[in-house]
Image (cartoon, rainbow, N blue to C red):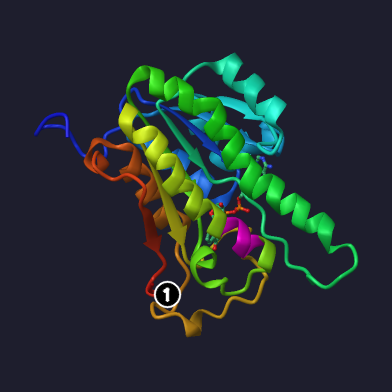
Amino acid sequence: MTSADTSPFDLTGRRILISGAAGGIGRATARLCAKQGAQLVLIDIVSKQQIREHVGADIADRAEIHSLDTGSRPDVTALAQHIGAVYALIDTAAIAPHDDWMAEDWEEALDRVIRANIKGPINLSRAFLPGMMQAGEGRVVLCGSVAGWMGGLRTGPHYAFSKGGIHAFVRWLSRQGAPHNVLVNGIAPGPVETAMTEGKGYDTSLYPLKRMAKPEEIAATAVFLCGAGSGYASGAIFDINGATHFH
Ligand SMILES: NC(=O)c1ccc[n+]([C@@H]2O[C@H](COP(=O)([O-])OP(=O)(O)OC[C@H]3O[C@@H](n4cnc5c(N)ncnc54)[C@H](O)[C@@H]3O)[C@@H](O)[C@H]2O)c1
């Protein structure tokens, strides 16, 4: 903590890149980070106009916005060269196709999931970690999932595989960052009310809290992980799953 008077969640003046910003958790994270005083760089694969509409004009007007596929290494590298260093990276971009893994053409879906859910976070980390290390401070927050621990409530094998990979990657990356005061952590949400879960048959009567999480309840942990209060958290995966799973 920098000072006893500073809020542990304060992000005043911190430049934070949020990927997947047009999504449910990304949008909520952008809004909460802005409320804590952060300067935002918002990216998503959808158009800039769609990012604006999803995040809200009040936040979008004060943010840098880029339409970009995080699975493309050249595009992510070009973005980093264009915008320069950021204090924190919060990656919420991912896909979770609902399909049949025995279908003949399933490999296409597997490739798409690996591109978005594995290559995306790796591309972003490779592009933005050096700037954080050079600055001698920084934060990386990646999204895992309860699926990465126990195989998932309603999701397929590609998604579970990718999220388990993210949990391992967070630990690996935390050891690269920690000596440079760059803290890398993950969040493993349970079921959250977003486009990713909509219409996929999640049965809330089966969950201990009898409801899914609100995106804001995941975003709050991302804010915490960028603030001074989490200054000794490194290599941890924060389970925000409403007691749906323990390990
Ligand atoms: N919703 C849940 O129940 C849940 C549970 C556990 C983990 N998660 C994880 O939380 C994160 C956010 O999920 P969400 O529920 O907000 O999903 P969402 O579908 O609402 O948002 C995901 C966003 O990522 C964007 N995106 C997808 N691929 C991209 C790419 N290649 N490049 C750039 N942007 C891309 C999408 O356009 C979308 O706006 C994801 O990592 C997801 O796996 C979600």
Give the vertical position of 5 relative to 131 (above or below): below
Range shown magenta:
159-163
Q: Is mark 1 within 8 Å of ligand 1?
A: no
Screen quadrant of the N terminus: top left
Q: Position of residue 36 (x, y in %)?
A: 32, 35
Q: Residue at 67% across / 46% down in the picture?
A: 116
Residue extending furthest bottom?
Answer: 205
Q: Position of residue 65 (x, y in %)?
A: 59, 27
Screen quadrant of the C terminus: bottom left
Q: Quadrant of residue 134?
A: top left
Q: At label 1, which amino acid type do we have?
A: His
Give the vertical position of 122 relative to 186 (above or below): above
Q: Position of residue 126 (x, y in %)?
A: 55, 30
Q: Residue at 28% across / 45% down in the picture?
A: 233
For mark 1, what is the residue?
245
Q: Residue at 62% across / 61% down in the picture?
A: 161
Residue nearest the observer in this picture, 245 or 3: 245
Q: Position of residue 234 (x, y in %)?
A: 32, 44
Give the vertical position of 207 relative to 181 (above or below): below
Residue nearest the observer in this picture, 131 or 63: 131
Q: Residues within 10 Å of mark 1 (few under 14, many from 20)?
A: some
Q: Residue at 16% across / 32% down in the picture?
A: 6
Give the vertical position of 92 relative to 89 (above or below): below
Is there any visible trace of residue 60 in the rendered image?
A: yes
Circle 1 SS class: loop
Main SS of the magenta part reads: helix
